[in-house]
Image (cartoon, coloured by chain):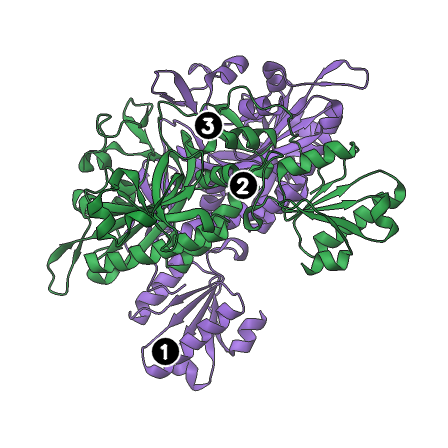
Chain colours: A purple, B green
Amino acid sequence: MRQSQLFTKTRREAPADEVSKNAELLIRAGFIQKEMAGVYDYLPLGLRVLKKIENVIREEMNEIGGQEVLMTTLQDPELWKKSGRWDDSVVDNWFKTQLVTGTEIGIANTHEEPVTQMLTNFVKSYKDVPLYVYQFQTKFRNELRAKSGIMRAREFLMKDMYSFSRTEEEFKEFYEKCAQSYERVFERVGLGDITFRTIAAGGSFTTGLTDEFQTLSKAGEDTIYIDKGKKLAINKEVYTDENIAKFGLDKNSLEEGKSIEVGNIFPLGSKYSDALGLKIKDENGVEQSVIMGCYGIGLGRVMGTIAEVFADDKGLVWPKEVAPFAVHLVRLGDSDEVTTFADDMYAKLRKSSVETLYDDRDLRAGEKFADSDLIGIPVRLVVSEKTIKEGKVEMKYRTESESQLVTIEEVLKM
Amino acid sequence: MRQSQLFTKTRREAPADEVSKNAELLIRAGFIQKEMAGVYDYLPLGLRVLKKIENVIREEMNEIGGQEVLMTTLQDPELWKKSGRWDDSVVDNWFKTQLVTGTEIGIANTHEEPVTQMLTNFVKSYKDVPLYVYQFQTKFRNELRAKSGIMRAREFLMKDMYSFSRTEEEFKEFYEKCAQSYERVFERVGLGDITFRTIAAGGSFTTGLTDEFQTLSKAGEDTIYIDKGKKLAINKEVYTDENIAKFGLDKNSLEEGKSIEVGNIFPLGSKYSDALGLKIKDENGVEQSVIMGCYGIGLGRVMGTIAEVFADDKGLVWPKEVAPFAVHLVRLGDSDEVTTFADDMYAKLRKSSVETLYDDRDLRAGEKFADSDLIGIPVRLVVSEKTIKEGKVEMKYRTESESQLVTIEEVLKM
């Protein structure tokens, strides 16, 4: 895309009303914009990142047999009354609204109840399970405070998967499979080295322990103790001698760190299936409970975390697979020769399907470089009077300080 | 995908609480499921259709220079007070909710105000326009009645584009360009022959006339008068001698028909830009108004219309570009020979990237054919003892009654 056409512009100053680094940088670079506290629009650059994260997750969910659906935001209270989660004293961050008739309805906070109810139409026998349903759908949480940018928003896009199994054993098999799938997701979006499967408290879902995926970051709200060799961590909230021993960890080899929860996987037992009447008949025609699990990744949370952990003092730094563009082509000067060379390079990159943001604006070099660093595309290619003399382009990785002169053929071979 | 893995199942009986043909068929075939009146989930088959419609629209919007964003559902009342549209007496189908603090906020009904407000951050000069912003985002409308299935839902996915131009002339140029783009969209999704650009009343947006895109259907709520030669129609609501003459139509060559509004394009003038303070400076530094237009297509409306107009007494009939799968491969019998032949054919189709639903279930032929007709995939391939004797497969188009024996090579060449 030609940057002269992109309607967003970068800002030099940080917005006065943001305290989180992710929101500050993403707003300055034109990736997001704030509607209200905890409520953010995704602008063209930000939406490209969000969609790339979504595609990585979709591929991995399909790989383990997930079937994609799209459930609704408006929610029938009757389903939530069955599980006991309609009352504001039980779930304290509901948004609710009313039909014209005055009937109160919910605005999706999560989807365990509707997905379970939906399956009562299709699942009757042990032959119908196991099955795994997932979606990318917005969740609404009426948070009292929202000051972590897109890492804890009032409205946010989530991938939520639900598993339905016949036995505890069958459930656990998938639970492990999904945990491994999550590791691939975080690896692919660039967070693999600093993200740890973490033993945690089950929260409102379960009385037992459960698993989180935590990414090391100074901006994190959690504290974890990590065994880097085993790639396993334990959340401070369950950091007891008993649990340390239970998971074969050694207190002396654990390192403390602040972290951000980027994903979680929960056993749900038969709490929701029993409450909503989702039962299966076994070989003998006897009704049995269905064992459920749920598996969440907040897409904005992942994007915000990537922004937080990789940014440097010049701006954002996107890992290759989630970058809004693969290449930032920057034209310096506006002589016919430079323009022709840069236009030609842009055409060649497009022809080779290299996603390119082409800075064809008439601005000073300093401004262009500052913008390029702020936006954080992995590879910068500069075309100037100097480079075209050698028929080359100056290439620099966002993560490195040294540049090199290369030919277009070398760029395309990358 | 193997049909034995698909969690949805078809139903023989129509749901008792649906009066519209689209909802009845889409529910029976397992494409959607109802949460509440006018609130539908998209199941795997339905979501595939919805995504295909979305991709067609996205390609055409990008083609005319649209920049994709994703705005929010939660809405700041202050923006709507500026344009005078917050009050329920002005917009009578708002859903509203409250923050924990008690502050009342909106649930997006449309996005003119927020998109205009957003652009005040980026648009300052005549050099910053024209520009075109669009999104695929859910709209919420608190309809008193909702009995048209996914054609008039309380919650529905919409493509809404907004144009920002310097002059009325520049605006009109894009308006025409977008109208032509809409014609390509409806052509590609299979509705081209029965969809007409239609002169209509501007509704609450404008006092002048505007354009709708209307698809002929007995299920339609509108009445239009069509000049088939000119591919132009006039809505009954503005069917006056004056308008007929104005658009060069001849009363004697107009045919009356019932129709469904599948898209609309509206001039907005400077109503929203003035109300929200979006101004541009001209060459002399003088502030000028920005001329806006909006351009909507409801994706569920399009999908419901396709279901309504093409279905026959056996079920759904999907046009190629929006079909959930390109091919329905049906295996009859479960001998090793048949299974091996069908599995092999499925592998070859997948290898050639032909999207295939493979009915590998152990059911009677009659049930499989009934399901295949109900689901409505364009091409059915049957593998049976009879066909494999000749090393072939029986191919039938959903829209035809005759089948023919063909080789796998002939199928792949299609």
Is the residue under label 1 in contact with that under label 3 (CB below 8 Å)? no
In the image, taking residue A191 as reference, residue B393 lies left or right, namely right
- List x then y, in percent, for residue B34: 51, 26
Callout 2 crowding tier (Cα within 10 Å): few <14, some 14–19, many ≥20: some
Q: Nearer the viewer, mark 3 or mark 1?
A: 3
Return the residue at label 2.
B310
Residue B268 makes an appearance in the image: no
Residues at discs 3 and 1 both on one chain: no
- Mark 1 neighbour class, 10 Å CA radius: few under 14, some 14 to 19, many 20 or more: some
- Give the foreground label among 1 and 2: 2
Quadrant hosting residue B257: top left
- Residue B63 visible (yes or no): yes
Q: State the separation of the CA atoms marked 1 and 2.
A: 52 Å
The kind of residue on which mark 1 rests is: Thr
Q: Quick check: A351 above or below A326?
A: below
Q: Is mark 3 on a helix, strand or loop?
A: strand
